[in-house]
Amino acid sequence: MRLRMTALALPLWAALTPTAEAVELTSWLKLDGFGTLGAYRGDDGVAGVRPDGRNPNVSRDGDLRWDGDSLLSAQLTVNPQGKFRLVGQFIAKDDVIKRYKPRAEWMYLAYDVAPNLSVKLGRMVSLAFLLSETRNVNYAQTSVRPVSTVYIINTVTNLDGLSASWQTPLAGGDLQVDGAVGKSKVSVAAGTVDVPSLASVAIKWSKDSFALRYARSEFKVDLSFPATELALGTLASGRTACINCAAVFAQRIPLKDIKGHLDTLAATYEIGNLSLQAEWAQRLADSAALPDVNGKYLLAGYRMGALTPYAAIGRQRVTEPPLGLQTAAAAPASARAANAAFDRFLQGLSGRDIWQIGLRWDLAENFALKFQYENIKNTQDFRLGQNGTVSYPSPPPIGTYTGPAWDGKVRMLSVNLDFVF
């Protein structure tokens, strides 16, 4: 439950301040920021939960933790009203590798080529999801955090490269087209994801209270996943009498130069006090180390003054086919069972159904207090390892755990104080 003072200082200051507003340091320099002071707990004695796949720790058996959603960010904009702008966003949030060490989430030079066309060069936001730009800005979201059934499919939040954004009126509404090319790298609980090539396009059309968005990202990926590499080594050693592992691994599970794409579709709609938000994503790749998967969710909220109760349902399914590992005919039944277990493990069968209910209370200007209860049910395989935000010990032959089996269900309670300034 340790939380460094760098992550606590500004949220505690903010909680004692009636309002928080952007600071115009000079006519050419502007300071903005946001933060969250969050706590969460998982209720299961076997499986642990974490708010995000990039968090190193989990909550298990009622352990109260403060190191998931809690963060602090500051954004500096040089020449905020000019055609040329330099923007730097720095964030301190618990991370697998860097922990709370502040890091540059954005650092780019922007230029307005025309009133409806701008370009950026440097480190900027990924275009993958509806909430990509505000993924870390919990205050800007109805719920405590983006719904996991979609957002754990892609943990890349930024890229280093070049982007362009173009807007024009269309069919009584506004059309916005964004494109970006570059590279990225991210550390998650399972290991390191290195993306040497990433190209994305996002198309959004909005009119009044309705918006529809589609995005596609083409990528090349190199993976460093120790648990997966250990499983591959165990099978390749012949210890389980697998007779086709070498051929299958060469064809189905390369860890380097993986090629694939991610498609997302999202819609938002507001009618009176009711707001609806839905999103779907599908990732397809040529390696089972990055299994084919799709996810979706629907979130609804209803504003009642300062209070917004909300609810969401979501589903994720891994569609990667079995590897078809074969065992020597003379091998014992235990070897056959071990190969079948490894086959499921390497498929990455992390499908889940979730539902959540919550309450957002805008207790003061630029401050929101949120309470959320989430129920997670694994629907494909809940015996072998971890799936981004849920972690559970693996029995032999994958691991050494010999305790009670997980029943596939876990619940997480979250309380967040979000603010912007």
Image: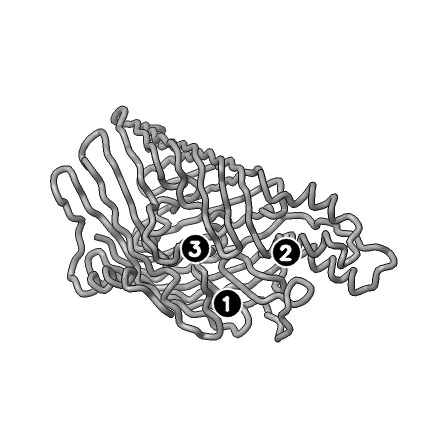
Within 10 Å of the Cα at label 3, are there few (<14), some (14-19), or many (20+) other Cα atoms? Answer: some
Measured as percent of width and height from the top left, residue 333 is found at 81, 64
| Left or right: where 22 falls relative to 320 | left
Distance of label 3 from label 2 (alpha carbons): 21 Å
Question: Mark 1 sits on what residue?
Answer: 48
Q: Return the residue found at the far right.
A: 330
Question: Mark 2 sits on what residue?
Answer: 230
* Residue at the image position 45 percent from the left and 48 percent from the top: 186
Do the residues under discs 2 and 1 have CB atoms within 8 angstroms?
Answer: no
Measured as percent of width and height from the top left, residue 376 is found at 51, 63
Measured as percent of width and height from the top left, residue 104 is found at 33, 46
**Which of the two residues, 233 or 339, is positioned nearer the viewer here?**
233
| SS of the residue under disc 3 | loop
Question: Mark 3 sits on what residue?
Answer: 97
Tell me the amino acid under the disc marked 1.
Answer: Gly
Tell me the amino acid under the disc marked 3.
Answer: Ile
